[in-house]
Structures are given as C-alpha cells and as structure tokens.
C-alpha cells in the first residue's frame, strides 16, 4: 500500500496533458478521444498546449510539479520531440521536482512501441500501456488495433526502456469465464514488473457497447458473476504481492502511480488540452476547471484567448467534502477524518459509520483513518453515497 499521507501534508501538485487523437474509437470508450482521417497539425497543437500551460502557471506560481501525466486519446501518437517540448515548458513555467514522475499512456502497436526510446530521451520515465487483453479474439472484440504478439513485444521493449511501467487489462468481458481470467491474469503477472491496472468492463453511456447491449448483441456478466471475477482478481493479486491500493489499481509497495495518488488524495493539478479537467486551490478556495472538449474549438480558443477553459468554478465546502469522500475512499489507505471535516466544514454521521462497520463495509485503521473494507469495495459507490448523505 502507498505510504499514508501524513496529517495536513500536501498531496502534491501535478500537470495533466490531454492528447485527444486516436487511430480508432474503441467501442467501450467514453473518454474525450477523436479519430482524424487527415493528419493532425501536431506543431500547432503543441504550441497551444504550451500556451495553456503558461495560462495555468499564472495562477499557480511557485508550485513544484511532482508529476506529469500525458493521457488521451493516444499520446504515444505524438512525436518524442513534441513530448520533450511540453516537458521543457512545464519545467520552465513551474519547476519539476527532483525525480518527478512523468507518465505517458501508450498503445502497444509496433509503430508506437518503437518510439519508446525517444520518449525516454524526452524525459518520460514511466509508461502506461493499454493492452486490455492477451488474446487476439478478445482484442478484436474490444476494438483494439494491436495483436497479442504486438502487446508482448511492446511490454518487452517497455521493460528494457523504463524502470517503471504499467499496463491495463479489462476483465469480465463478454463470454469470458473466471477460469479464463485466472489464467490470463497469471500470464499478465509474468509480464508485469510492479503495477497493473485491472478494470471490470462497464457499459458506459453513449458508447458503441451500450448500443450493442441495448440491441441484444452484447451480453456482459451479471452482478453475481461480476463479483466472482472481482474476488478472483483480489485473491490472485494479493497472493502475488500486488494488492489493490485503489479499487482498480494494483502495485507493489512504493510502485503506485504518484500522479493518480494526487487525484485520489484530492491534491491540486492543472489540466491542459481538449477536455482536460483540473483542480486548483488558492487560499481557502478550490476551483474546478474544465476545457472545451472539441479539439478544433479548443485550439481556436487557446489561440484567441490563451486558454480553452469553459468551466472555472469555485467549489462549495459541501462539494469539496463530497469530492473528498468520492476520491479518497477509492484508496485502500482510506481518508483522514479530520481532513474531511476541515475541508467540508461538517462531520461524518457517526451512526452511519457504526452501521457500516457493523455490516462489514468500512473500518478504522490503526492510525485512525476510515477506509472501505475488502468486503465493501465491490459496493464502493453505495458505501460512499451512504456516508455522504
């Protein structure tokens, strides 16, 4: 488990950079990703990203950047020189902390994997690879453009190139049995180093999978079978020494994603690029920021006004408290109750806590933090809703 945040400690400051372009749209994906059939003007978008970095830096002067995360979309479609320009800009407008974590999401196609050395030279020191499945039939069903052989090759290159890398898998796929998942997860562990992201397939609104399900062309596991998948995942990962430090993320102690911990510990982060979100604190105020989702509209806005923000709202203390619960209870370390009270201006309902403890859904740690129990994690949304009410 990640080292628990000390009372009153700053969770850190991160920068999220969104590259919205993909080669194709996966049928399960509801992220802000766009397929362009004409070449992307990479230099123009890079200049706009740097312009938006400058804009965010104006309101966060003096912050030290603990982590950078290039997400998407598919940021590995960028050139290494563009990634280097953006990292240099972040370091010039803020200051990169010594040993800052710099992560780039990548697809394991053969073309993108050959760029790993260039990304490493540009300053990236961690990659997160979207493998999703280890057999060709399921990769095709998931709309992925790589083969299982390409995935294995990309993981081999990542292992040689980076000290830290992670990859994603989706489980509870249509037609998949728990026994098949156990076998696949064992294979994944043999390929992994110290971090895996394991997501149970969910049907998101507005996706192709939702339309297929509603038309009767896609059947996903029901709740009981889904729980069997969950239990098998926890059993195998705990046994391998990579427990869940967050509901879908597993790591050896010390290998957690530092950038994502900033999110879950409700730290500050600047979000730049189309559809990026950010949370910025100043004094006792905390702002929720979001940018224009459409890449071309975002580009025009940045070139005209210096930023693409369409939301820049001050969160109420109640909203901050709800967000604190929603994010913090995703973590195995749980939350510091005193920090919740200082953030939200209210206390948690002790009768609700005691009821949830009696039901085995939550527990207190030896250091006094409140966390969701192993039994409660599969019902996380309901537990959070109960506590927040």
Image (cartoon, rainbow, N blue to C red):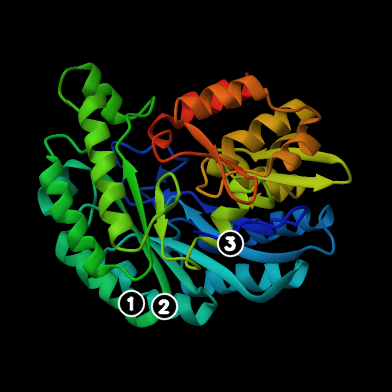
- Which callout, 3 or 2, points to the residue nearer the camera? 3
Of marks 3 and 2, which one's residue comes earlier in the chain?
3
In the rendering, at what x and y percent does residue 379 appear? 41, 29
In the rendering, at what x and y percent does residue 362 appear? 51, 34
94 and 294: which is toward the camera = 94
Q: Compared to 179, does 117 lie above or below?
A: below
| Residue 202 appears left or right of 334 | left
Residue at the disc numbered 2: 162
Per the model, the C-alpha gap separating discs 3 and 2 is 23 Å
Per the model, the C-alpha gap separating discs 3 and 1 is 25 Å
- Residue drawn at the location 29% of the way across and 69% of the way down: 111
Mark 2 surroundings: few (<14), some (14-19) or many (≥20) residues within 10 A: some
351 and 256: which is toward the camera = 351
Label count reads: 3
- Which callout, 3 or 1, points to the residue nearer the camera? 3
| Residue 98 appears left or right of 244 | right
Residue at the disc numbered 1: 159
| Residue 217 appears left or right of 302 | left
- Residue drawn at the location 16% of the way across and 51% of the way down: 182
Q: Quadrant of residue 99?
A: bottom right
Q: Compared to 159, does 317 lie above or below?
A: above
Cβ atoms at labels 1 and 2 below 8 Å apart: yes
- Residue drawn at the location 77% of the way across and 34% of the way down: 341
Residue at the disc numbered 3: 3
- Residue drawn at the location 54% of the way across and 69% of the way down: 82
Q: Quadrant of residue 227?
A: top left
The quarter of the rendered structure image containing the C terminus is: top right
Q: Quadrant of residue 67?
A: bottom right
């Amino acid at each position: 488990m990640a080292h628990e945040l000390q009372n009153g400690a700053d969770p850190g400051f991160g920068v999220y950079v969104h590259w919205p372009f993909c080669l194709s749209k996966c049928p399960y994906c509801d992220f802000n990703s766009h397929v362009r059939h004409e070449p992307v003007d990479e230099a123009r978008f890079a200049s706009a990203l740097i312009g938006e970095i400058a804009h965010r830096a104006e309101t966060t002067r003096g912050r030290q950047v603990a982590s950078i995360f290039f997400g998407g979309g598919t940021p590995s479609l960028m050139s290494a020189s563009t990634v280097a320009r953006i990292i240099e800009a972040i370091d010039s407008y803020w200051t990169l902390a010594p040993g800052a974590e710099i992560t780039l999401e990548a697809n394991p196609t053969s073309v993108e994997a050959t760029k790993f050395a260039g990304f490493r030279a540009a300053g990236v020191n961690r990659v997160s690879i979207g493998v999703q499945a280890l057999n060709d039939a399921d990769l095709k069903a998931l709309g992925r453009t790589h083969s299982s052989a390409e995935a294995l090759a990309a993981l081999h290159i990542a292992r040689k190139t980076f000290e830290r890398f992670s990859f994603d898998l989706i489980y509870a796929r249509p037609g998949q049995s728990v026994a098949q998942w156990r076998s696949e997860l064992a294979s994944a562990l043999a390929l992994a180093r110290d971090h895996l992201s394991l997501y149970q397939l969910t049907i998101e609104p507005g996706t192709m999978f939702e339309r297929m399900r509603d038309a009767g062309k896609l059947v996903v596991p029901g709740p009981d079978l889904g729980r069997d998948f969950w239990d098998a995942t926890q059993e195998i990962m705990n046994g391998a020494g990579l427990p869940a430090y967050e509901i879908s993320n597993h790591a050896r102690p010390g290998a957690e994603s530092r950038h994502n911990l900033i999110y879950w510990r409700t730290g500050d982060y600047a979000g730049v690029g189309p559809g990026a979100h950010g949370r910025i604190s100043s004094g006792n105020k905390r702002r929720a920021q979001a940018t224009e989702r459409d890449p071309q509209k975002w580009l025009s806005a940045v070139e005209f006004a210096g930023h693409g923000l369409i939301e820049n709202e001050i969160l109420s203390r109640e909203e901050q408290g709800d967000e604190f619960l929603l994010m913090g209870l995703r973590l195995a370390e749980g939350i510091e109750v005193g920090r919740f009270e200082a953030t939200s201006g209210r206390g948690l309902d002790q009768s609700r806590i005691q009821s949830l403890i009696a039901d085995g859904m939550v527990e207190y740690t030896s250091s006094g933090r409140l966390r969701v129990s192993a039994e409660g994690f599969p019902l996380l949304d309901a537990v959070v809703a109960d506590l927040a009410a």
